[in-house]
Image (spheres, rainbow, N blue to C red):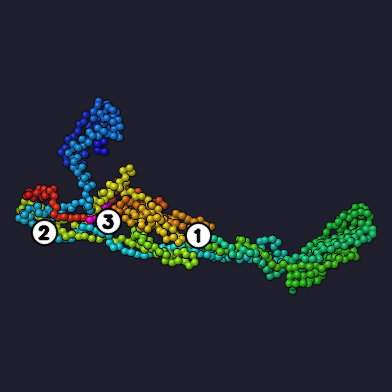
Amino acid sequence: MKRMLIGICLAICLVCGVVEVRADCSGIDDPYLKAKCEVEGQKASGLVGAGILAPNMTKVPQYSGSPGCVTAGCSGAAEERYYDDPGSLSAAGGAAASSDERYSKIQQSRIDRDGWDLRTSSPVTTAQSTAATLPTDSIMTESCSVVNMCTSYTEGAGVTGTCQVPGGSRQTCLKIRNPTLLPNACTVPGIPSPPYTSETEVNGCKDLEAAGASGLAALVTTTCLDGAARDLKCSQPYATVLTGGTSGFNAHDHAPGMAMGNFTIESAFPIWDGTRWVVGLNVTGNSAGEDKYGCTNVGSVKTGPYVLTPANPTASGNGSPAYCNSKCSCFGYPMTFTMGAFSPTGPLSWQVPFTYTYESHSIAVVVTGTFLDTYSVAPLTGCFQEEQTWDVTSTAGDTCGEYRDKGCNQVSSRCASVQPGTGYCLMYENTYKCPGPSECSTTQPITQCTKCGKPDSPVPFCVDTSTPPNENLALAATWLAMTKNVEEDWDPDRLRIFTGKRSTCDFSTIGRSLINCCDSDPDKLIGKCSEEEIALARDKHDRKAHLIGTHCVDKGSFLVGSVCLRKEEVYCTMKSELGRMVQEQGRVQLGMTWGSADAPQCDGFTVDQFSALNFQAMDFTEWYKNVSANIDPAVITKEMATKICTYTGTC
């Protein structure tokens, strides 16, 4: 990049043909002020400014060739594709960069930064080890104290706890529908066709249906236990059925004419006479005179009906010929209908004598029938008694939330309560192991000293010869590791730092399976769960994962609603443990959220956001277990000795 910038700057100068007039900035030591001086000088000379730099950005750098050359072919480069393969121009740029007096120091700084790791590098020089190079006691006075400094940390013993999460069960319930005859079903004349009833329901499935509507239960089967028709009896007869003696006919030869008479009992109906149930009759009939004059009466038309009841058992009327003409004597004989005394012949059967009289002729019959007081009713909804079977998610409390929130690892799970007869697990007991605080595993006694110049001595100040205290050493190691993590976790395309990745695992909410693909032990998941879930388990074990939340990913649809069959845990996983810690504490400082399980926000920090973080307010003690340092006070560097000589003037 530096070589390219040098090339671009040279190209701008050569193409524009501007004579550079630059201020002298060589006497400025501060890098920022010096750079500002250089820019102001370029602005004054016309090399940079509005409309100057941008138009020349695409020009080809000219290390050789004639002025005005704008292609790689005349620029002195052997290759046409300069920006893909710089060739000799790149070599020239490298030579120009190495001639900068600061180049070697920059390169050495990079080597020092990349090459030193507090946990693996050679022993570091301590301030105590330089004490021997200080002037004698005649010039300096010294005060010392011995402290134990922690040189390595380990994870604490931690805490193991158990908790419960709800499982599922299988339950049955009944819906019972009771039929009741409609009010007019038991009054005369009753109801001729269904429906004869209304129904009341006793719903023993109400609670399960409500759970189904809330997604906590699923309807499995519906079985009708009673769908057969029932007989419902009225307290009184509502109708009758005629069984015999319902009609009669008589023809009388008057020579030459013929007289005719007929009757029909159309129907019977029940009547309460104050003491018992009797019947009334609906009667029709007709009579016709003889056809003396050779004309023809074609059939006859019934007259009536006449209603005969026990209070009025007799009715009469005139007959009416169906057809006559001028040759016929058109008349009908008077008719009389007489109903006899009602008598029962069984619990519901009865008989009544009946007489039909016209002219001097009579027809006598016995009318028989039965009372109706019972309806055969079928269920209006198809079933009088319905059994439902449901799979139900337990509503017992989930006490494992506090362990999940703390980032504890689940180490086991067992069914604590099994539903008899179904094998369903009503309640699971899970065991979690929570990490303990970092503990110091190795210490080293360090003498902390301060040497000060005596009054009137040539040393007008104090020199701190103490070894850095414990917390500084751990914090320094943390900063070094974070610097390395930022470099490894930097997205140059999107300009983001500590970018996370959405990772998921799922588990069953109903059923007998004890396979939990959200377990934090990757060894348990091999061969049973997906590669993504195994990788997530490793990240959780290494503390690189942050839990966003849980949502349903598989629902069963049923008659009254749906139930969640499988749930998914959603995480943001980082490339390092420190990256996860900075994300968790940094988002709180910036007011940023992680989103939701349906839409997690795992993006990294922008440069501005990262620069705004207050790292001094962050707690990195969780990471100190990774710090392991080797302090050797016997190592003395030449650079440290030189500095002491410079301070004291005595070597």
Q: CA distance from mark 2 to mark 1?
A: 79 Å
Tell me which residue sits at (8%, 57%) in the image. 141
Q: CA distance from mark 1 to mark 3?
A: 46 Å
In the displayed structure, 325 sits above or below 261; it is: above
Tell me which residue sits at (70%, 68%) in the image. 373
Q: Which residue is mark 1?
A: 218
In the displayed structure, 7 sits above or below 524; it is: above
Report whether 364 appears left or right of 545.
right
The picture places residue 136, in percent across and down from the top left corner, at: 6, 54
Q: Quick one: quadrant of the N terminus?
A: top left
Q: Which residues are magenta?
A: 614-628
Give the residue type at disc 2.
Ser
Report whether 634 appears left or right of 349.
left
Q: Which residue is mark 3?
A: 623
Are there few (<14), some (14-19), or many (20+) residues within 10 Å of tag 2?
few
Q: Quadrant of residue 202?
A: bottom right
Where disc 2 sits, the SS reads strand
Q: Which residue is mark 2?
A: 143
Secondary structure, magenta segment, majority class: helix
The picture places residue 186, in percent across and down from the top left corner, at: 69, 66
Where disc 3 sits, the SS reads helix
Residue 467 is at least partly visible in this image: yes
Tell me which residue sits at (27%, 27%) in the image. 74
Q: Is 375 or 324 nearer to us in this picture?
A: 375
The picture places residue 251, in percent across and down from the top left corner, at: 89, 61
In the displayed structure, 610 sits above or below 281; it is: above
